[in-house]
Image (tube, coloured by chain):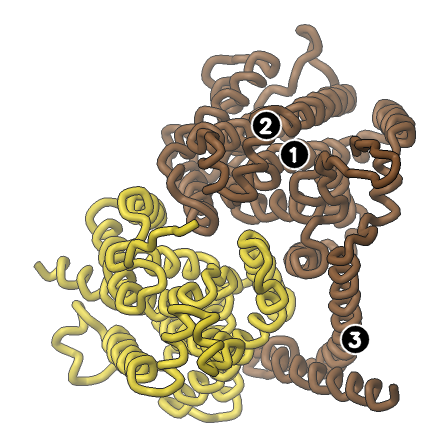
Chain colours: A brown, B yellow
Amino acid sequence: MVTDMLQNFKQSIVVSLWFVFLTFPLMVVRVNTMNQEVIWRWMNMVWVAIGAFVLSYLWRYMLSRQQMRKQVADEGGEIRSRMQILLEDMSFRYRAMGFILLAALVFPLVFDTYQSTIMISALIYVVLGLGLNITVGLAGLLDLGYVAFFGVGAYSYALLNHHFDLGFWVTLPIGGIIGCLFGIVLGFPILRLRGDYLAIVTLGFGMIFKVVMENWDGLSFGPSGIANIDRPNFFGMDLSLANSTIYIYYIMIALVIFTILVTNRLKNSRIGRAWIAMREDEIACVAMGIDIARTKLSAYALGAFWAGMVGVLFASKTTFINPASFTFMESAIILSIVVLGGMGSILGVIIGAFFLILLPEYMRAFSEYRMLAFGAAMVLMMIFRPQGIISNLRQTYEYKGSKEKIDNG
Amino acid sequence: MEYFLELFFGGLTRGSIYALIALGYTMVYGIIQLINFAHGEIYMIGAFVALIVAGVCTIYGLSGVSILILAGVIAVIYACAYGYTLEKVAYRPLRGAPRLSPLISAIGMSIFLQNYVLLAQTSDFLPFPRLIPDFAFMEPVAHIIGSPELVILITTVITMILLTLLIKKTKVGKAMRATQQDMNMARLVGVNVDRIISLTFIIGSALAAIGGVLVASYIGQVNFYIGFLAGVKAFTAAVLGGIGSIPGAVFGGLVLGWAESFAAGYISSDYEDVFTFGLLVIILILRPAGILGKVRKQKV
């Protein structure tokens, strides 16, 4: 035991020293070329040393725990967490859903406009996350340019509104359909690609979208963007800012519910099963007679559809859009929502979105560390909990020994 | 004609830098089939470390070529250290995981490193001192190819010759080739595969850092975000040439450099990035294995 502890201690010291060395030039030294002076920030070095020391203990502990879980799983033991068992209880689920729905409905009446605005942006990310969840979580197609579809939706509303005075309600489905079309158009050429190539091409598409929008002044008004986009009107009436925020909030709630219902149905449908099969093994999937081209395209198109719709809503909420809203970082945020929440799991993605959007919003002091934490969280999640916060509950059929009962859960 | 030559050499310079970075991608991909998304960040960190070292040296009164060499060497050492740590922390625990996992981990690492540099240093563009002096003998052709370009070209060629020698002639290189062909078999004949993978990351990072220092002193400014675009473009170059193939990476880098340079020079510089990604998409559709790559049949 003692030698073990000593060993651990030594290891942590080495790790700590290594990270001190690693972060030395960037964390400690700062050159001020204006005044020709070097600022030495020795405190940072101390923090790095302590942090690395503690984290290395944590790292080893987590790794050993994961090893143990794996062992338990191999022996056929229970690996579901308490949370998951609770979630599988149907009556609890219905009660919880009712409560959440009620809370969501009274939210804007209790809190002020500012809170509602924050909530709207969180809900926007919920829908985006659920949309990307179709492509990444269910179909296993890593899409790094997802924000382009969001941008397509936003720009289609902004332009249709600007040139033809089309209203919000008309454009909402149009935005979705245009997003969908873009998904199909971009999906076609990359049908043959898989995995990492696909990721990089979609990343390229995302970048192309932004560059084109920045430079094609005739279409998109360039980097200055489009302003004065109409807010959604209420049966022909224009609303005040506060009321319109509440109105958009309710539209958003409806959209979220609609998205949840549809994606939930999709997940267990024929096509949803095909997506999951494709994610698990493409070749086996072809061998089972599934049309890969159609399955991939539908995943792209449907994923893009939600992004297009919510893009329309985004444009109507902010009343101003420019290409700066559609950078790779947005794609990365949406992706981390899906990854952290749990790929394929609807509840997980929703929780992930709230977590990632609301936390930095309410903890302003830490908001500059937001992306740092996102990046670290993505790595850590992949290593320690690849299934996400809430893992995807797949319908499994279990054989329960003596009673010969087939349990559907 | 002069304009053409200027673009030609501009493209060559640019392309050789892409090739340097692309080599890191290609070597890593060849061995563990992973797009090391954070590779561009290593390049950026290399440039940043060089900037800091150069800044400190200038203030403490060193000058000229000694700074360039010192900054370059320290940048390479640090980039190697970062590359090694990156592999150990973010990729090694994921060996054997589904293919999407290390890719997402790599993206996470890329975001993390970018923001780490952003928070530890600054988000502004920092001026990078001109470390490469203007040679007198380059005077007559300076409007076509300047001294920095010449230095970049020479450095790149030397680096690549060294790399080729390392891979073709040494025992370590042999082990690397064996690992690339068949990891399990390599392990059976006594190759320490883990060490070879670490080494691949280290070599790739060193190349990226050399590229980073050269570019930074050529363009004259550094920012935490430069790695991302350079990384994506270098990856494009690697794919163009056929990922996993070392001559392919060099070839792809040069093709990409020229394509960008000529497209920007003759068509429009606003859409430079669009040309790059357009090229990537076209290549992947027409010839997913790349120009020099071997088509690998997938067996079930």
Which residue occupies the foreground of this view, A272 or B123?
Answer: A272
- Using the image, determine if residue A146 lies above or below residue B237: above
Q: Disc 2 or disc 3, which is closer to the eye?
A: 3
Residue B218's x, y, as percent?
34, 71
Residue positioned 23% across, 66% down in the render: B12
Disc assigned to residue A57: 3
Is residue B106 rendered to the left or right of residue A342? Answer: left
Q: Secondary structure at mark 1?
A: helix
Q: CA distance from mark 2 to mark 3?
A: 43 Å
Cα gap from disc 1 to disc 2, whole angstroms: 8 Å
- Kindly identify which residue carries mark 1: A130
Q: Which residue is mark 2?
A: A306
Is label 3 in a helix, a strand or a loop? helix
Dot 3: few (<14), some (14–19), or many (≥20) neighbours within 10 Å? Answer: some
Is residue B267 visible to us here? Answer: yes
Q: Quadrant where the N terminus of chain A lies?
A: bottom right
- Place residue B236 in its image quadrant: bottom left
Instruction: Assess whether mark 2 and mark 1 are in contact (beta carbons under 8 angstroms).
Output: yes
User: Quick one: label 3 or label 1, which is nearer the N terminus?
Assistant: 3
Query: Which circle's residue, 2 or 3, is located before the other in the chain?
Result: 3
Q: Is residue A113 above or below residue B22?
A: above
Q: Chain of mark 1?
A: A
Q: Position of residue B222 (x, y in %)?
A: 47, 68
Three-letter code for the amino acid on which mark 2 is drawn: Trp
